[in-house]
Amino acid sequence: MADIVSREEWGARSPKGAYSRLSSTKGVKVHYTGGHVSPDILDDHAKCVAMVKSIQDFHMDGNGWIDIAYCVDEETEILTRQGWRSYRELRTGDIALTLNHETGMAEWQPVLEVCVFPAGEREMIRMRGEHHSSLTTPDHRWPVERDGRRVWATTETLGRRDRIPVAAPCADLPVEAKWSDALVELVAWFCAEDHGDRGPGGEPASGVVLRHSERNAANVARIRAALRQVFGPPREDLSRAGGVPGWREAADRHVREFHLSVDAGEVLLGRAPERVPAFEFLLTLTRAQLALFIETSLAAGTLARRNRAAAEALMFAVLLSGRAASLRRLPPTATRASEMWLVTIGRRQSFAPRGAAGARFTMRREPYRGEIWCPRTGNQSWLARRDGTVYFTGNTMVACPHRKVFVGRGPGHLPAANGPGLNSGHYAVLGLVGNAGLVQPTDGLLHAILDAVEYLRAEGGAGKEIKGHRDGYPTDCPGDSLYAWIRKGAPRPGATVPEPAPGPEPARPWPGRLLTYPPVMRGDDVRAWQERMKELGYDIVADGAYGPQSREVCRRFQRDRHLDVDGVVGPGTWNAAFAAEP
């Protein structure tokens, strides 16, 4: 398990601007610090922290690098224990609902950081359908389910087999009931009646009244039974209850009325002021009681509420129960003077954006000039809402000899030191050794590098490659000792390393540059790749220009070969193409 030291813990400076998103995840490049590294860091971890800070200072002040591409637009909200919050309302330390992408369970976690980037000209991708609305950066990360596996994808690389979770069972629900089931049911009946029972001063007038049509005898019987369990048998004269909560029953035309004493009414109002269930109350319900609350709300006849706060609370209960929910406004009609807010309970736990058919679902690029933002949580995910629709959505590393991993730019962010044209191919992991002083990596350092690699694979979608900085760029980094270890296959210290079986050589070696779009790239290497695609049966024009058609063919090929779908012809995609049988 990686021992991760967050940016906050090691005292990182704020970035000067926005990171570029990492557009490809072939693997990891290992670096070293270069220069003299004092062996004293072996005895004092605080000196490792100081060294990481000095490296950041050099990169930002000496190299002029920034030191976080963000995620979503201004309208996107996050679910906290206090309800939905915008990025302007969200604060570090707020508890938000996240997705543990390893277990598939929802978990409450603190917000570690709220990253906001000012307005500017940028391109975003809008996904919109009947039950989904998002506006994200192209490389925004999504937790997806693909062929029975849980993996990470970006907006731009979502495939037809990818399903984005919109709900998940909550792992943090109470297992012991704080309230009786009868009280939970009464609160649900109480909140289903979307009107108030308060006098001019805002206090209870003559107590709460529960009303229900006598045509539904089963529901009337349920309310009566719950009242008996909570408050005892009915009383004819509530004024003589002597402070003991009580209730009585009456009929008004075709409506059955249950009048509660002031004390009994306060029991319900304490859990649902103004007939709006308090989030604190909902958070104390067990999984079975949440199901009871929702079932009772459905039995009441409608999930529409005149009060938006009541609809928000009902939606909160549905999401806590692990079911999908959405919220939309119903405008006034000829037969209804006021607007309503309708909660819809979804039947599915996920949706397939690329598999959505026709005009009901669209994905398109568009310019955007507003602020963009993203929260950071321990699970690298959070529950988002936009236009009433809900979905789960989603730090490069430094390793030290004490087997600790410092978060640099982190998963999903473009590193700065792999060399021109190569940053998009790999994450960067820096080992604290140099070419003088401490030059031999310790077992703790090698373990930490591999811990960082595993973390980047799990959280950032890093591919299988582990290479040195000098692979593809003329430099002595990561030093002879680290590079020799990488050439051996980067084994865990103490592990028995079998001799690797030689793999098949591609018919044509990779030309050494990534083929990407935009902008259009031209050259003989592009033409060679296009001709190879034609040989493999793909519909493509071999014109030597890598544009949108070539990128789409590349993506289809990557899906067919079970590669990372990013539309970039890197060494993995190139070698797979030229090693494939026509």
Image (tube, rainbow, N blue to C red):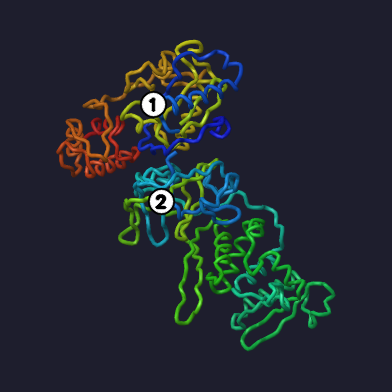
Label 1 crowd (10 A; few <14 / some 14-19 / many >=20)? some
Task: Kindly identify the amino acid type of the residue bearing the numbered disc 1.
Answer: Ala
The residue at the far top in this view is: 437
Which quadrant holds the N terminus? top right
Mark closest to the chain's N terminus, 1 or 2: 2
Q: What residue does disc 2 label?
A: 370
Q: Amino acid at mark 2?
A: Gly
Q: Residue 507 appears at what percent x and percent y?
A: 21, 27
Coordinates of residue 450 in the picture (x, y in percent): 48, 26
Instruction: Say which mark, if any, is on residue 201.
Output: none
**Distance between the alpha carbons at the discs numbered 1 and 2:** 30 Å
Residue bearing mark 1? 417
Residue 168, can we see it? Answer: no
Left/right placement of residue 88 relative to residue 489 reads right
Across and down, in percent, residue 483 comes to: 41, 17
Label 2 sits on a secondary structure element that is: loop
Report the residue at 33% width, 51% height from top.
367
Residue 255 seen in this snapshot: yes
